[in-house]
Amino acid sequence: MIEKRNFYVNGEWVAPSQTHDFEVINPSTEDPCAVISLGSEADTNAAVAAAKSALPGWMATPVEQRIALVEKLIEIYQTRSEDLAQAMSLEMGAPIDMARSQQAGAGTWHLQNFIKAAKAFSFEKPLGDHAPNDRIIYEAVGVAALITPWNWPMNQITLKVGAAAIAGCTMVLKPSEQSPLNAMIFAEMMDEAGFPPGVFNLVNGDGVGVGSQLSAHPDVDMVSFTGSTRAGTAISKNAADTLKKVHLELGGKGANLVFADADEKAIKRGVLHMMNNTGQSCNAPSRMLVQRPIYDQAVETAAEVANSVSVASAAEEGRHIGPVVNELQWTKIQDLIQKGIDEGARLVAGGTGRPDGLNKGYYVRPTVFADANNQMTIAREEIFGPVLTMIPFDTEEEAVEIANDTPYGLTNYVQTQDGARANRMARVLRSGMVEMNGKSRSAGSPFGGMKQSGNGREGGVWGLEDFLEVKAVGGWATE
């Protein structure tokens, strides 16, 4: 049993102000794997005070030095990558090979992209040729509360910490209590890299406790949150009294529009993308909209692919999906699968219960529903498990109408060999991201959504700007 009972505050590992233990469960076995302490209001206040005290000095540190510290962090990250992968596999159920390549790999990817973006970013620039004595200065927002989820832990921590550090913000990180071990390793890395005391602080806690305290705290200048839309709404309301900035990366119900001229791998690619990370991705293509001429064959192919996806312990090497994160999520997914059956969708793969041979652990059968419509619960709600909903369509206009008929707007996907159609779809789909024919977004591309999928953008120059204020200066003196 791993014990992690300390917090990282003002450059030191400190004991919590009071004992409030929380058991972290290994979702592959349902057994406790770690005990952490959840923070109290006194712990939150201490971390915020440390960040506030460190802010003037960190903001005044030349950006080149801030970038150099992030470069040092990358070096250390690479030496601890296996530790991070093992932690995430244990605590949130990512299969170990996937934890190494995707979960841990995401961290170095984002940090490297921030460095590239920062070196090309003008933190101070003229307003324009028409105003030679005006300057635009990009200045740190201030003390940033970073609240991260359990499903892609290092992905989200580095997207927030990397940008905040380069921008000159000081920060308090509250990772998910479901997956805290990787975050504590990350705190060790920040310490080893030599970030000044108070620049980075970590306090474990739950959303009701530390999360609420941070979002309402008068000395916190902004909250960057990734998680459910429900929690994002609560954070926004809690932050309103102090008018702090709130950047949100929330849920999704992505549509994957497969036209009759799609390439032959489009269906398989879409199913496997949906099943990746056991379906626990906000940008998962969970609604597959298929044009009628190829619909029947697509359903058959999707069922075959889903039935070929193996499910096993996160500790096992190889290509398979692991469990979902906890019992609460497992039960929710089971209820939604049953809801799909009850509402008349045709179950063509998977279903309720655990996969054969797995009697313990939060394992879900890779599931595909066909003949659904967009009013069914499984087409409206974010399931956050390995469950795909297939809906037929006839025309391009109908596909767009179905795709956009959702409160979410994170990622949509388009599969067609018609370049003009692909571009038309990109313009009319109401989502912060659109990906075509299996081509993912490139380095430095911003991640974020519209509508109830949030309002922030993470990654690259847009991720830096989330943590910067714009200051306009008139009458700038020539030095």
Image (cartoon, rainbow, N blue to C red):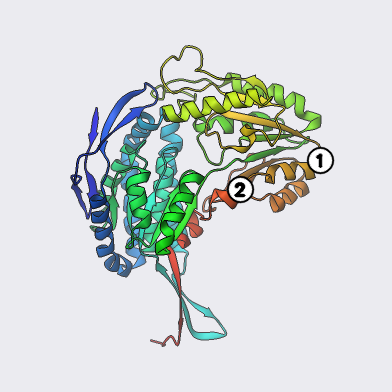
| Residue drawn at the location 42% of the way across and 33% of the way down | 99
Q: Is residue 90 visible?
A: yes
| Residue drawn at the location 24% of the way across and 46% of the way down | 7
Disc 2, SS = loop
Image quadrant in which the N terminus is located: top left
Q: What residue type is labelled 1?
A: Thr
| Residue drawn at the location 58% of the way across and 28% of the way down | 387
Q: Mark 2 points at which residue?
A: 409
Q: Mark 1 points at which residue?
A: 395
- Would you identify the image quadrant in which residue 129 lies? bottom right
Q: Position of residue 56 (x, y in %)?
A: 29, 68
Number of residues whose C-alpha sits closer than 10 Å to that of mark 1, classed few (under 14), some (14–19) or many (20 or more): few
Which residue in the rendered view is the most extreme toward the top?
357
Near-viewer residue (18 or 464): 18
Near-viewer residue (342 or 412): 342
Image quadrant in which the C terminus is located: bottom left
Q: Earlier in the sequence, mark 2 or mark 1?
A: 1
- Whole-number angstrom distance, CA of label 2 to CA of label 1: 21 Å
Q: Where is residue 43 in the image (x, y as percent from the top left)?
A: 24, 50
| Residue drawn at the location 50% of the way across and 12% of the way down | 356
